[in-house]
Image (cartoon, rainbow, N blue to C red):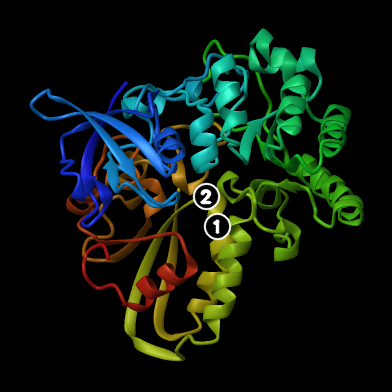
């Protein structure tokens, strides 16, 4: 195992020790360094022995005395130096299995790596953990972790995940609890499978693990139009969404009395489907499952409410179009209506149907270049068009179907600007604070 060094912090210990870009970190105190967690954990000692390989192949062993919390100053290209730990399950609703062909290769990788869970909040199932992984989680106290539970009944969880190892969920949670590891859990809700009384039992059993289990996030199953030879599943209806909103509201009342927090939260899609106003910020407590799409709409609307106080009454005549997925219309409509009260400003929403994925996929983050270009139909040449960055590959200007931002600009003829998804970024772009391409 090795970790190529891509940068050295100037003036750091690494700089003083003549460590260079291109050198490869091998071990710290005899411990193989598999990821950034290992590096940070083992490099914090006040005395360390660091083994590395120079660019000419020479092996160096450096003895370093330092303050306990003093950083070495090494920079790496990624946080994982070995291979990503992938998912070995066959979940009934696995989104990767529903992807069309021709997308970026990395999109077909099924991440189930506990390190990404600790570092970024990615959800894992715990079914692929080896004993050495468990020891690392516990010894390094990797907390919190984010766990896809889906249900607490062992036999049903085996059926849902398609793995016999899924049956040990209670023992696995207890092991994390005993180690003092906090857990945020997820339930992907599938009508007729893990809903109804099964859902209630799962929520109530998970609440018995509080405070080790800190939250339960419930998200609706996402189904694309590419489910040939996959199990038949049902989408959640508006009527079911309304029922779950009422049920979770009741649970929140109970848990706020017991835990002083709501504990269980519904994804924004339930409120969109039921056409019910999003809850107030208090519903989401500390927004502990924001990466799961739980509370994003409320944050956006509250931020716009603050910005509304400083909106101008009039601007120079300007027309703007905002690309969005269909499900975000409920969030954006009141914002657009308020912006259109500004004299001289005309804002239009341009909702894009997701034909590429099909099924019930309607979120903005899964829009593709092909569908965006089809929606624009060469009618926006010379027009100002705003597109959210969430549709692009992180750190790049490439969409899911490998269409680039530059290609969108060239083929549509529009003046396309990107925004970061916040209300502030959107308002600035609409009002003309970003007049160069991009921002």
Decide if residue 226 is in sight here. no
Q: What residue is shown with label 2? A: 326
Query: How many numbered marks appear?
Result: 2
In this view, which residue lies farthest toward the left? 56
Label 1: state its secondary structure.
helix
Q: Label 2 to label 1, Cα distance in Å?
A: 6 Å
The C terminus, quarter of image: bottom left
Please state the horizontal and vertical placement of residue 17, each as a whole percent of the image.
Answer: 20, 44
Identity of the residue drawn at 49% across and 35% down: 116
On screen, residue 49 versus residue 405, left or right, reads right
Please state the horizontal and vertical placement of residue 436, each as a whole percent of the image.
Answer: 21, 69
On screen, residue 242 versus residue 50, left or right, reads right
Give yes or no for contact between labels 2 and 1 (Cβ–Cβ under 8 Å): yes
Label 2: state its secondary structure.
helix
Residue nearest the viewer, comparing 43 with 211: 43
* Above or below, 306 relative to 27: below
Identity of the residue drawn at 62% across and 36% down: 146
Residue nearest the viewer, comparing 391 with 370: 391
Numbered label attached to residue 169: none
Q: What residue is shown with label 1? A: 329
Please state the horizontal and vertical placement of residue 253, each as a whole percent of the image.
Answer: 89, 55
* Above or below, 357 relative to 64: above
At label 2, counting other C-alpha atoms closer than 10 Å, the crowd grade (few under 14, some 14-19, many 20 or more) is some
């Amino acid at each position: 195992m090795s970790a190529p060094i891509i940068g050295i912090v100037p003036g750091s210990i690494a700089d003083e020790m003549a460590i260079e870009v291109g050198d490869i970190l091998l071990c710290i105190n005899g411990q193989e360094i598999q990821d950034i967690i290992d590096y940070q954990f083992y490099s914090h000692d006040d005395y360390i022995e660091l083994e590395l390989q120079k660019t000419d192949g020479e092996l160096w062993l450096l003895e370093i005395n330092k303050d306990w919390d003093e950083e070495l100053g090494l920079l790496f290209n990624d946080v994982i130096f070995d291979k990503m730990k992938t998912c070995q399950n066959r979940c009934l609703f696995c989104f990767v299995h529903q992807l069309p062909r021709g997308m970026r290769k990395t999109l077909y990788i099924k991440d189930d790596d506990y390190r990404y869970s600790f570092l970024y909040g990615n959800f894992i199932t715990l079914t692929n953990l080896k004993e050495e992984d468990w020891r690392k989680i516990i010894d390094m106290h990797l907390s919190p972790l984010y766990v896809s539970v889906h249900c607490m009944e062992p036999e049903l969880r085996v059926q849902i995940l398609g793995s016999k190892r899924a049956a040990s969920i209670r023992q696995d949670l207890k092991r994390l609890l005993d180690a003092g590891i906090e857990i945020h859990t997820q339930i992907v809700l599938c009508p007729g499978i893990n809903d109804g009384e099964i859902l209630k039992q799962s929520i109530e059993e998970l609440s018995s693990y509080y405070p080790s289990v800190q939250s339960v996030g419930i998200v609706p199953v996402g189904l694309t139009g590419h489910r040939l030879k996959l199990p038949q599943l049902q989408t959640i209806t508006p009527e079911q969404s309304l029922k779950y909103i009422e049920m979770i509201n009741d649970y929140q009342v109970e848990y706020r009395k017991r835990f002083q927090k709501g504990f269980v939260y519904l994804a924004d899609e339930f409120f969109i489907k039921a056409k019910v106003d999003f809850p107030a910020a208090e519903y989401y407590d500390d927004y502990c499952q924001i990466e799961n799409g739980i509370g994003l709409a409320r944050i956006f609307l509250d931020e716009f409410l603050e910005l509304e106080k400083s909106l101008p009454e009039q601007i120079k005549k300007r027309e703007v179009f905002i690309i969005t997925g269909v499900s975000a219309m409920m969030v954006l409509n009141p914002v657009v209506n308020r912006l259109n009260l500004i004299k001289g400003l005309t804002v239009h929403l341009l909702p894009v149907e997701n034909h590429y994925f099909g099924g019930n996929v309607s979120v903005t983050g899964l829009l593709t270049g092909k569908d965006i270009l089809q929606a624009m139909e060469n009618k926006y040449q010379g027009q100002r068009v705003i597109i959210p960055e969430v549709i692009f590959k992180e750190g790049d200007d490439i969409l899911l179907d490998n269409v680039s931002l530059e290609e969108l600009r060239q083929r549509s003829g529009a003046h396309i600007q990107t925004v970061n998804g916040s209300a502030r970024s959107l308002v600035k772009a609409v009002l003309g604070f970003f007049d160069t391409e991009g921002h």
